[in-house]
């Protein structure tokens, strides 16, 4: 599903080279000390970022394929290639890790949707992009459906975050409806997302579902919303009367 930011703990005292400057060349030594420390900070920061990402990636794979309750933190550590104790330096519990995995996924979903919508012109293009983004998100996670169906129970922070995510997603779709001049943008946004959520179930439950099937449904949903059910009928030729 759809990162917690964990800052590194740097030493409270300055590195030895700062206090080792002699009176003879303070400027030169002080500059060298700052430079060496900055290099070390960048190196450590890169390591921290790499480990954090590796843990999130491992959590995503294991939670998605096995489920929250079936996944052990020792398995996450092994897949990430780090010690189990190191995982707990970044995430205090399995619930916290699952929330971080979810946040990263959801934030990526919203950021990518925003970029795609900015490149659109017409309302139909925007609706097609929303539908395609929604359905392809689930299609690309066909092997990780347990992120959605085997999440932790009674996790208040997760529930609160998912409510916040859905609100942000709803607002994004609602803005599209408002910009088109729609009279009931909120109801339209709710209805459209609801339609897409129903279509996504085909992806989750049909083993033979293809990418082409997902894209076809995205185009159909946008067309149906723009033209209505009657507009989706095949044109019929009225027979001439004698």
Image (spheres, rainbow, N blue to C red):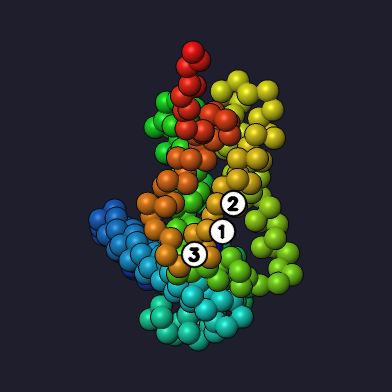
- Which numbered marker is on residue 197? 2
- Which numbered marker is on residue 235? none
The mark total stands at 3
> Label 2's element?
helix
Q: Where is residue 220 in the image (x, y as percent from the top left)?
A: 48, 40
Q: Quadrant of residue 158?
A: bottom right
Could you tell which of marks 1 and 3 lies nearer the N-terminus?
Answer: 1
Q: Where is residue 186 in the image (x, y as percent from the top left)?
A: 68, 34
Q: Mark 3 points at which residue?
A: 206
Q: Dot 2, crowdedness within 10 Å: few (<14), some or many (≥20)?
A: some
In depth, the one of 42 and 227 nearer the eye is 227
Q: Nearer the viewer, mark 1 or mark 3?
A: 3
Residue 5 sits above or below residue 135 on the image: below
Residue 103 sits above or below residue 131 on the image: below
In-image side of 213 versus 100 (left or right)? left
Task: Tell me whether the residue at label 2 lies in contact with that at label 1, contact meaning CB atoms closer than 8 angstroms.
Answer: yes
Label 2 to label 3: alpha-carbon separation: 15 Å
> Label 3's element?
loop
Q: Dot 1, crowdedness within 10 Å: few (<14), some or many (≥20)?
A: few
In-image side of 183 versus 15 (left or right)? right
Q: Which residue is drawn at 50% across and 36% down?
A: 222
Q: Which residue is drawn at 59% across and 51% down?
A: 197
Q: Position of residue 61 (x, y in %)?
A: 45, 72
Q: Dot 3, crowdedness within 10 Å: few (<14), some or many (≥20)?
A: few
> Label 1's element?
helix
Quarter of the picture containing the N terminus is bottom right
Q: Mark 1 points at which residue?
A: 201
């Amino acid at each position: 599903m759809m990162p917690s930011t964990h800052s590194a703990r740097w030493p409270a005292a300055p590195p030895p080279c700062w206090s080792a400057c002699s009176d003879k060349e303070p400027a030169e030594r002080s500059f060298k000390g700052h430079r060496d420390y900055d290099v070390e900070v960048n190196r450590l920061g890169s390591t921290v970022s790499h480990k954090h990402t590796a843990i999130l990636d491992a959590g995503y794979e294991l939670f998605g394929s096995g489920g929250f309750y079936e996944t052990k933190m020792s398995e996450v550590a092994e897949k990430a290639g780090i010690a189990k104790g190191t995982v707990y330096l970044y995430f205090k519990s399995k619930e916290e890790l699952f929330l971080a995995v979810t946040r990263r996924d959801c934030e990526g979903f919203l950021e990518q949707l925003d970029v795609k919508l900015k490149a659109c012109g017409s309302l139909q293009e925007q609706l097609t992009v929303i539908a395609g983004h929604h359905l392809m998100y689930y299609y690309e996670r066909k092997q990780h459906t347990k992120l959605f169906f085997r999440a932790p129970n009674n996790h208040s922070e997760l529930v609160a975050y998912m409510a916040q995510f859905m609100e942000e997603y709803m607002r994004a779709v609602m803005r599209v409806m408002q910009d088109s001049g729609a009279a009931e943008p909120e109801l339209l946004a709710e209805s459209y997302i609801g339609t897409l959520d129903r279509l996504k179930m085909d992806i989750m439950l049909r083993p033979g579902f293809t990418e082409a099937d997902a894209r076809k449904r995205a185009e159909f949903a946008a067309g149906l919303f723009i033209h209505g059910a009657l507009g989706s009928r095949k044109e019929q030729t009225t027979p001439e009367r004698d």
